[in-house]
């Protein structure tokens, strides 16, 4: 496993396992146990995923020392604001059966996220959270939160894959010392991701799959990645990306796939904002 060094000196695995859309508790527990068994050390969950308990059970059972694991959760929009966010993080700790979290992110840049961030800063100072950050913060909001708070976010988790590479936003994150982390590194299979000819051609040279080339490309661009799969075989495949290196030419060809546009939704789109903020009720 390779690591990235966050702006507060903490080491974070560059590749982790995400549990979005694994709602069934037993399946989620099994998945996290499998992931840890095959070598994943970073587990990415969220209050909104409804599976923090399952992640907690797997972490408890897995037999790997707590300090070797890196557990992330995210504060949901409904829990925004200082007091609510603080108690929701305490609740997450309980559900996860943990004394501390390695990383807590603001899930979405809506509602009173300044209040949320202040609560996270206080828990960070108390040592209950080792690093704090944000998710889905486009450059404007990222600069804003960075400028007017004491602690600079360590991570910004945003949609990042070969079709939406976040080249410019990554430059801005770098300028402010924020580590980019990719959600949906396979674009959830959209746009015929897993049969993409360019990725396949490159992969054939190394005997690697489209998924492996896609992850390798992001890793070589210093992007932390969170592939999700419920299949143990695919977990093994998705973590097996550290024994080959793409050439400059191959990197350039893959960069050419970038459309610099979301395949899901834009956080600037009023309908998206109405949808996401509507989930609070
Ligand atoms: P993803 O990782 O891009 O794609 C997951 C899909 O790819 C699943 O359908 C999976 O199917 C399939 N897959 C995985 N490995 C494969 C392989 N080697 N070959 C073929 N198919 C493969 O999508 P995601 O789950 O949306 O994103 C990953 C993680 O990012 C999430 O789990 C979550 O932790 C995080 N995330 C965060 C946000 C946010 O707002 N912060 C939003 C979305 C996601 P199977 O499971 O059937 O194998």
Image (spheres, rainbow, N blue to C red):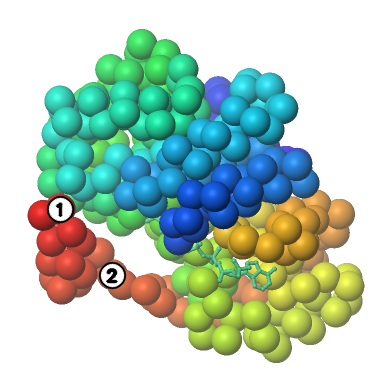
* Secondary element at tag 2: loop
Residue found 40% across the figure and 31% down from its top:
95
Classify residue 46 as left or right of residue 225: left
Residue found at the very far top of the displayed protein: 126
Q: Identify the residue at image location x=86%, y=54%.
A: 243
Quarter of the figure with the N terminus: top right
Q: Quadrant for residue 74, please give it.
A: top left
Disc 2 marks which residue? 266
Q: Nearer the viewer, mark 1 or mark 2?
A: 1
The relative height of residue 100 versus residue 39 in the rendered view (above or below) is: above
Numbered mark located on residue 280 in the image: 1
In the depicted view, which residue is nearer to us: 45 or 61? 61
- For residue 49, the mark is none
Q: Is residue 134 visible?
A: no
Cα separation between marks 1 and 2: 19 Å
Q: Is residue 129 left or right of residue 213?
A: left
Q: Is mark 1 within 8 Å of ligand 1?
A: no
At horizontal 55% and vertical 23% (from top left) the residue drawn is 9
Does residue 159 appear in this view?
Answer: yes
Q: Compared with residue 25, is residue 10 higher up or lower down, i.e. above or below?
A: above
Instruction: Name the spot of residue 165 as percent of width and height, x first.
Output: 50, 67
CA neighbours of label 2 inside 10 A, class few (<14), some (14 to 19), many (20+): some
Q: Quadrant of ligand 1?
A: bottom right
On the image, the x and y values in percent for residue 244 come to 85, 59
Quadrant where the C terminus is found in the figure: bottom left
Q: In the image, what residue occupies the spot 60% across and 37% down?
A: 58
The yes-or-no answer for disc 2 within 8 Å of ligand 1 is no
């Amino acid at each position: 496993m390779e690591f990235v060094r966050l702006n507060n000196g903490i080491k974070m695995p560059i590749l982790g396992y995400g549990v979005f859309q694994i709602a069934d508790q037993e399946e989620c527990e099994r998945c996290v146990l499998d992931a840890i068994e095959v070598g994943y050390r970073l587990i990415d969950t969220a209050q909104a995923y409804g599976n923090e308990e399952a992640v907690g059970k797997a972490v408890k059972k897995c037999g790997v020392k707590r300090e070797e694991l890196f557990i992330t959760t995210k504060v949901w929009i409904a829990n925004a604001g200082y007091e609510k966010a603080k108690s929701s993080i305490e609740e997450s700790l309980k559900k996860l059966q943990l004394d501390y979290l390695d990383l807590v992110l603001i899930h979405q840049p809506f509602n009173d996220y300044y209040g949320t961030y202040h609560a996270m800063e206080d828990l960070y100072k108390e040592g209950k959270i080792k690093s704090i950050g944000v998710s889905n913060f486009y450059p404007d909001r990222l600069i804003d939160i960075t400028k007017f708070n004491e602690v600079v976010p360590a991570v910004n988790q945003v949609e990042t894959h070969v079709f939406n590479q976040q080249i410019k936003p990554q430059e801005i994150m770098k300028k402010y010392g924020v580590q980019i982390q990719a959600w949906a590194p396979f674009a959830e299979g959209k746009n015929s991701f897993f049969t993409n000819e360019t990725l396949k051609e490159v992969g054939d040279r190394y005997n690697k799959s489209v998924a492996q080339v896609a992850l390798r490309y992001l890793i070589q661009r210093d992007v932390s990645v969170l592939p999700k799969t419920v299949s143990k075989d695919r977990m093994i495949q998705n973590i097996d990306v550290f024994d080959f290196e793409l050439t400059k030419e191959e990197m350039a060809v893959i960069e050419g796939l970038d459309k610099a546009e979301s395949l899901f939704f834009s956080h600037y789109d009023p309908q998206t904002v109405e949808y996401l903020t509507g989930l609070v009720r």
